[in-house]
């Protein structure tokens, strides 16, 4: 056997990063709210997001159904524009939920130990 064909067993095997590693990295940089225990609890907590999701799916489904059945193109266009507005509303609601959750955590932290913190946007 030549030197090129020998395998060095002493070298550590590099592991691929798993989804858990990515979550841990993100949780150090960003504040991530805890997961709900059940789906019903999640719907109760985030009812605005669920409503936006259902509106987006409803507009998209109705627009695609109207288009596939050869319906009026103006109606299809309006339904798909409605999907865009519903999706925009949902994304804005997600931003509002994140802002409100971070504000709540900051207020709780100030009660425990007041700090003068600066916000850095990255």
Image: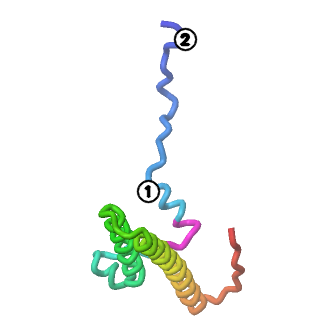
Is residue 58 depicted above or below 106 in this figure?
above
The x and y percentages for residue 110 are 60, 89
From this viewpoint, which residue is outermost toward the top? 1
Pick the residue in front: 102 or 49: 49
Say which quadrant the C terminus sits in: bottom right
The x and y percentages for residue 43 are 33, 80
Name the image colouring.
rainbow
Quadrant in the picture for residue 83 = bottom left
Q: Secondary structure at mark 1?
A: helix
Is residue 82 depicted above or below 110 in this figure?
above
Q: How far, Cα to Cα, is label 2 from label 1?
A: 38 Å
Pick the residue in front: 73 or 25: 73
Front: mark 2 or 1: 1
> What residue range appears in magenta?
27-32
Residue under numbered circle 2: 3
Q: Are marks 2 and 1 in contact (CB under 8 Å)?
A: no
| Lower position in the chain sequence, tag 2 or tag 1 | 2
Quadrant in the picture for residue 66 = bottom left
Q: Residues within 10 Å of mark 1 (few under 14, many from 20)?
A: few
Q: Is residue 37 left or right of residue 74?
A: left
Query: Residue drawn 31% across and 66% down?
Result: 65
Query: Residue drawn 32% across and 61% down?
Result: 68
Pick the residue in front: 120 or 79: 79
Which label belongs to residue 20? 1
Q: Secondary structure at mark 2?
A: loop
Q: Residues within 10 Å of mark 2 (few under 14, many from 20)?
A: few
């Amino acid at each position: 056997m030549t030197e090129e064909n020998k395998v060095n067993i002493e070298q550590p095997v590099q592991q691929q990063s798993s989804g858990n590693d990515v979550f841990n990295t993100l949780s150090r940089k960003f504040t991530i709210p805890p997961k709900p225990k059940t789906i019903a609890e999640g719907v109760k907590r985030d009812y605005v997001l669920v409503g936006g999701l259902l509106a987006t799916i409803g507009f998209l489904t109705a627009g695609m159904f109207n288009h596939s059945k050869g319906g009026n193109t103006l109606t299809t266009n309006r339904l798909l524009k409605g999907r865009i507005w519903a999706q925009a509303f949902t994304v804005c609601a997600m931003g509002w939920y994140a802002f409100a959750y971070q504000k709540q955590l900051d207020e709780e932290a100030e009660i425990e130990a007041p700090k003068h913190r600066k916000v850095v946007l990255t």
